[in-house]
Image (cartoon, helix red, strand yellow):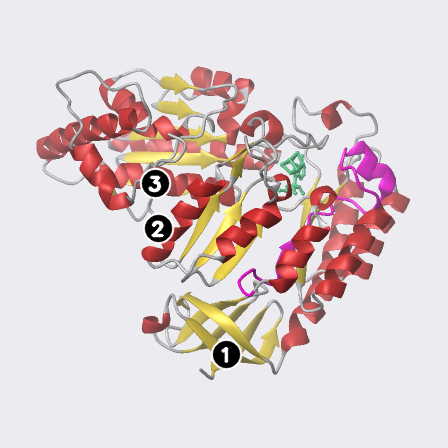
Amino acid sequence: MENKELIFDSNIDKLIESADLTKEAPTEEPYRQYWFMKKARQLVNEKSKELNRDLTFCVNTFGCQMNARDSEKLVGVLERIGYVEAPDENADFVIYNTCTVRENANLRVYGRLGYLHSLKKKNPHMLIGLCGCMMQETQVVEKLKKSYSFVNLIFGTHNIYKFAELVVSALTNDRMVIDIWKDTDKIVEDLPSERKYPFKSGVNIMFGCNNFCSYCIVPYVRGRERSRNPKDIVREIEHLVADGVVEVMLLGQNVNSYGKTLEEPMTFAQLLQEVEKIEGLERIRFMTSHPKDLSDELIEVMKNSKKICRHLHLPLQSGSSEILKKMNRKYTKNQYLELVEKIRKAMPDISLTTDIIVGFPGETEEDFLETVDVVEKVRYDSAFTFIYSKRTGTPAAAMENQISEDVVKDRFDRLLSRVQEIGRTMSARYTGTVQEVLVEEQNSQDTHLMTGRMSNNLLVHFEGDTSLVGTICQVRLDECRGFYYMGTKVG
Ligand code: 5AD
Ligand code: SF4
């Protein structure tokens, strides 16, 4: 399979069609899944005839860009087997692609399941599927088995590639189908996916995480780090570009350690250079960078690139070296600040954003003030601020000195107002300039306006029409309104 051509989407349809249902399902992937897609198509078709209407689906995504990309893969399969997208959860197949990075994400899922149950009582044909990170937690699956027996299908993050096979099981089984793997080293290429936007797409470059930050559940639910073969990545992007995509977001939990696990190791900066060569591709973004692995080579490649966007998301988590040590982040406050200085020196116009956790166990007022100090020194364009959430099984959950809710809330509010104040001034620094934007959509409140995204990730609304969607325009930024601009198209 090493050097095979990537199978393009239209070919996938032919391959599904040519699967032989009179024989057993093949064992080799992705052909096994093509066989199950054909089988599922048959089952959906029969049911649709019986009900005399189309069967509908709704995929609801929680969490990060990785999950958003995984959901596009689920939708790709559902559409190929004959389901039609419904506007809401009143559908024949509802899937929740879950997140578990913080406790409240889990609580939201349980809450919504009650609502789904009420819909299912009205539609006996309805199937409910749950997947994603939350399903990788044993206690979650136990709870679902015990108290949410109306759920039809549960699977995790490692076997999403066999979704078609799982759908066939769910369609032919009255009992709850559960398939969770602890980990995998497998990467299955050439499965269908349905992009949310025709002109931009996420592209997985690696899966899993080996960093084990002490608060984080991701390494336990997404497994060990594994990188996709660069040839497969480049071919996928070439195909996307041929299909109208002008911007890609390279996705990984820690893109800066890309390529370490490959048979022929390569760096993330080298991969970016390969992607840059793809003709017709206009913009490259990536997410997420770990400061400890951000190399000088990457800064140099970014600086010299015409396509890599002027935006870097560089999670800080805490500004206190003491807390960073307990978090197992492997950098100090000063190292982080030095890195930022290096980046800004190479690219003065770059927009920096970050993630910050408030209330990590043992965080003192002094530690917190160190965080505020970094925020004031770096002056982020924006920052996601989170209240520390205790995740069962992580080292931090067992640490002493968990911080009381009111102390955390007070620190959180203080941090947020500082972050927003700085973010507003930083965002406004482009007022009066002309920027290249990728036009993404019509403004839902005022249909005369279109919304475009700048290289630095800020949004601008300007007068225009839907024919501009997916094109790159020059827009003058007239007025900054907090975190977005109003502008005028000038070319
Ligand atoms: N509590 C709060 N925030 C967390 N994050 C990860 N784990 C936790 C946790 N247990 C945040 C980090 C990470 C982002 C995706 O989520 O800031 O960068
Ligand atoms: Fe979690 Fe740290 Fe891995 Fe990010 S790098 S996913 S915060 S363990």
Q: Secondary structure at mark 1?
A: strand
What secondary structure prevails in the magenta region? loop
Q: Which residue is mark 3?
A: 6
Amino acid type indicated by mark 2? His
Find out if the beta carbon at label 3 lies less than 8 Å from the nearest ligand 2 atom. no
Q: What residue is rendered at 41% in x and 35% in y? A: 96
Q: Which residue is mark 1?
A: 475
| Quarter occupied by the C terminus | bottom left
Q: What residue is rendered at 31% in x and 22% in y? A: 28
Amino acid type indicated by mark 1? Val
Q: Which residue is mark 2?
A: 239
Ligand 2 visible in quadrant:
top right
Query: Relative to residue 413, is residue 181 drawn left or right?
Result: left
Question: Could you tell me residue 337's position as x and y percent?
Answer: 81, 54
Q: Is residue 366 visible?
A: yes
Disc count in the image? 3
The region drawn magenta spans 306-332
Whether 141 is drawn above or below 270: the answer is: above
Mark 2 and mark 3 lie on one chain; the one further toward the N terminus is: 3
Gap between marks 2 and 1 measured at Cα? 29 Å
